[in-house]
Amino acid sequence: MSLTIGIDVGGTKVFAGVVDSGGRMVEKLKRSTPAASPEQTARVIGEAILELLERHEADAVGIGAAGFIDSAGSTILFAPNLAWRDEPLKKQVERHVGLPVVVENDANAAAWAETNLGAARGYEHVIFIGVGTGIGAGIVINGQLYRGRWGIAGEPGHYRVIAEGINGPEVTQAAREGDAVALRCFEIVGDWLGQGLAALAAILDPDCFVIGGGVSDAGDLLIDPAKAAFAGALTGGHYRQHAEIRLAQLGADAGVIGAADLARRSFGLQALAS
């Protein structure tokens, strides 16, 4: 069974894993991201890959990063939480590790993993929404990842609602304990999310939405108001099928698993066994 390496690069950590063709994570490791230095970030990625190669024989590497990736899967055009600007990451890492590399948006990688192995398994028209500090998305149409003409499709918005203050886990815990203000926060966020999904449904008509990212840890506290808002805002909702709205199943591993399989497919290796 062939192995590939997936990398999920965020503003604070590099998460690397060896993944088999069944989507199983054989080994994983994490390293801190030197976000202010593109060169140092590439070095940390390369060193993580080489460490995994000491114990596993892998054939290719897929890297997922939050940002704009060119259509060739080679250069990071812009990353909001890292210093990458027109950074030729593919060439840098290939030179370091001696394996073929493909670079992909992190939400695209997560969307691919959730469609093939996670919450949207069995669906062919899927929109993955990652809700955290910002909002990212990945789109699968007819079972294929949709990147758009320039490789930058799936960017509904990156924003921080409140710059400072209490964090998401604290609000979630308070809501679970019945705090009225915290519950109202989730009603508001869920309403925004549901209306956003309705707008995406009007444009792309998916059969499944998958909600991931840190905010999704709230579970039904978020999903229930989102479903209600979606049903109320969906254009012609009484005369059409409603897309499923599901929580992601693969958690933090989705980006690594998806990136590894996209590398496997890009270089003609054994595809993910769904």
Image (cartoon, rainbow, N blue to C red):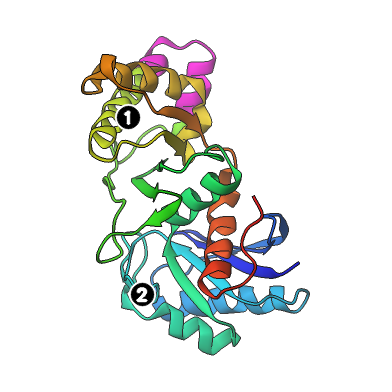
Which quadrant of the view contains residue 56?
bottom right
Q: Residues within 10 Å of mark 2 (few under 14, many from 20)?
A: few
Tag 1: amino acid = Leu
Tag 2: amino acid = Ala
Callout 1 secondary element? helix
Question: Which residue occupies 45% across, 34% down?
Answer: 215
Asked whether the viewer can see residue 90, the reply is: yes
Callout 2 secondary element? loop
Disc 2 and disc 1 in contact, CB within 8 angstroms? no
Q: Quadrant of the N terminus?
A: bottom right
Residue 26: x, y in percent? 74, 60
Main SS type for the magenta part?
A: helix
Q: Residues within 10 Å of mark 1 (few under 14, many from 20)?
A: many
Mark 2, residue position: 72
Residue 177, magenta (yes or no): yes
Where 139 sits versus 206, above or below?
A: below
Magenta stretch in the rendered image: 169-184
Looking at the image, is mark 2 or mark 1 nearer the viewer? 2
Question: Which residue occupies 41% across, 18% down?
Answer: 182
Question: Which residue occupies 60% across, 76% down?
Answer: 60
